Amino acid sequence: QKEVEQNSGPLSVPEGAIASLNCTYSDRGSQSFFWYRQYSGKSPELIMSIYSNGDKEDGRFTAQLNKASQYVSLLIRDSQPSDSATYLCAVNPSNFGNEKLTFGTGTRLTIIP
Amino acid sequence: DTGVSQDPRHKITKRGQNVTFRCDPISEHNRLYWYRQTLGQGPEFLTYFQNEAQLEKSRLLSDRFSAERPKGSFSTLEIQRTEQGDSAMYLCASSMTGGTEAFFGQGTRLTVV
């Protein structure tokens, strides 16, 4: 079992709709969760962080965390063509001696005009 | 401070040559991470530092790879006797402490011919 799993996509969403990206993780002790956006040929850009159960909203982005289900999601409202990118889920156990970010393989999102 | 800086942005080298990459983290960040990313995959952890101390090194990292952060500021990653399989994007990230938001540099794209 991979430590962080994402559906690789591609996920196609019409412009203006809600894009929903999902991620599951295996380490139940994980404490910190991040979503990165990566355009082709570029480096990952941090867009959301979440540390506690529930929802966290930032503009058009909402991150959702459910530690009991070991599940993190990212919602993008009013999707724009500029949102077309690969979205990487990253998890940090935050336990002493194991504090590195572990990434999923990413979900490729395409917004259709 | 404009963020994490990596140099060079691109490097083409012949198989068997040594290469060295540099990373300058965000100045107040104690943590510095090196990752490698190949096409279609998420970033793969290589090593990380807390100040000048190298706290963890991936088992996937062969003895040809070495990283340093001598004064707790910038870091270098050296690959000796490069192989074609080393071709990848090498990413550096920094964060305040473990478990907090990590920001990536623009990466160094290595091509071994």
Image (tube, grey):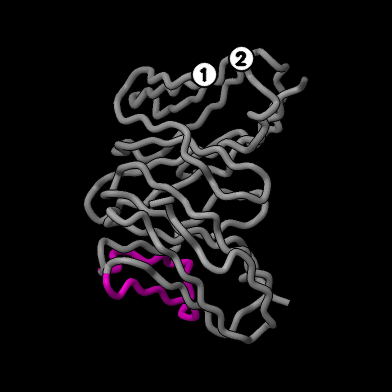
Image quadrant in which you'd find residue A112: top right
- The residue sitting at 31% across, 56% down in the picture is B27
Highlighted magenta segment, given as a residue range: B53-71
Residue B12 in the magenta stretch? The answer is no
The three-letter amino acid code for the residue at tag 2 is Asp
- The residue sitting at 65% across, 13% down in the picture is A17
**Residue bearing the label numbered 1:** A60
> Which residue is at the far left?
A96
**Residue bearing the label numbered 2:** A78
For the C terminus of chain A, give its image quadrant.
Answer: top right
Residue B77: x %, y % from top left: 46, 72
Residue A79 vertical position relative to residue B96 in the rendered view, above or below: above
Residue B61 in the magenta stretch? The answer is yes
Residue A51: x %, y % from top left: 31, 30
Q: Nearer the viewer, residue B109 or A64?
A: B109
CA gap between label 2 and label 1 equals 7 Å
Q: Nearer the viewer, residue A26 or A49?
A: A49
- The residue sitting at 66% across, 29% down in the picture is A82
Left or right: residue A113 versus residue B4 is right
Image quadrant in which you'd find residue B109: bottom right
The chain identifier of the residue carrying mark 2 reads A
The image shows a total of numbered marks equal to 2
Residue B83 vertical position relative to residue A41 in the rendered view, above or below: below
